[in-house]
Image (tube, rainbow, N blue to C red):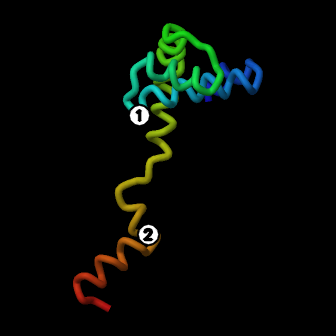
Amino acid sequence: MIVQQAIGALSPVHAEIISEAVWLYPCFSLSLREVELILAARGIEVSYETIREWSLCFGREFATTLKRRRPKPGELNRSGFPGNCIQAASGGS
């Protein structure tokens, strides 16, 4: 994966910080300054401009990865739980 190769060249601590910042921004619809404040509360001083640059550089790849992990429409029924609920509600055995 391109992101892992690009981030992997950094130390594990830096890679984790970049991943967290890029993940927080789109997943929770936060502003760049809000992500900056969240990281500052954790003791990480990063400007919102840096977070913006990271998001432009790595954001698309993170979004693609998250979309790939998302379950397909029929996958929940294979686990048995939703199918059992629907079957019980309809009176089937």
Q: Is residue 7 left or right of residue 75?
A: right
On the image, the x and y values in percent for residue 84 come to 37, 79
As drawn, the residue found furthest toward the bottom would be 93
Q: Which mark is residue 78?
A: 2
Q: Residue furthest left?
A: 90
Viewport quadrant of the N terminus? top right
SS of the residue under disc 1: loop
The residue to which callout 1 is attached is 28
| For marks 1 and 2 on the same chain, the one whose residue lies earlier in the sequence | 1
Badge nearest the viewer, 1 or 2: 1
Q: Amino acid at mark 1?
A: Phe
26 relative to 84, above or below: above
Is residue 42 toward the left or the right of residue 32 in the image? Answer: right
Task: Kindly identify which numbered label has been placed on residue 58.
Answer: none
| Crowdedness near tag 1: few (<14), some (14–19) or many (≥20) residues, C-alpha within 10 Å | few
Q: In the rendered view, tell whether residue 41 sits above or below residue 28.
A: above
Q: Is residue 44 left or right of residue 31?
A: right
* Residue displayed at 36% across by 71% down: 82
Residue at 46%, 70% in the rendered image:
79
Q: Residue at x 37, y 29 (%)?
A: 29
- Give the left or right position of residue 22, taking residue 84 as reference: right
The total of numbered circles placed on residues is 2
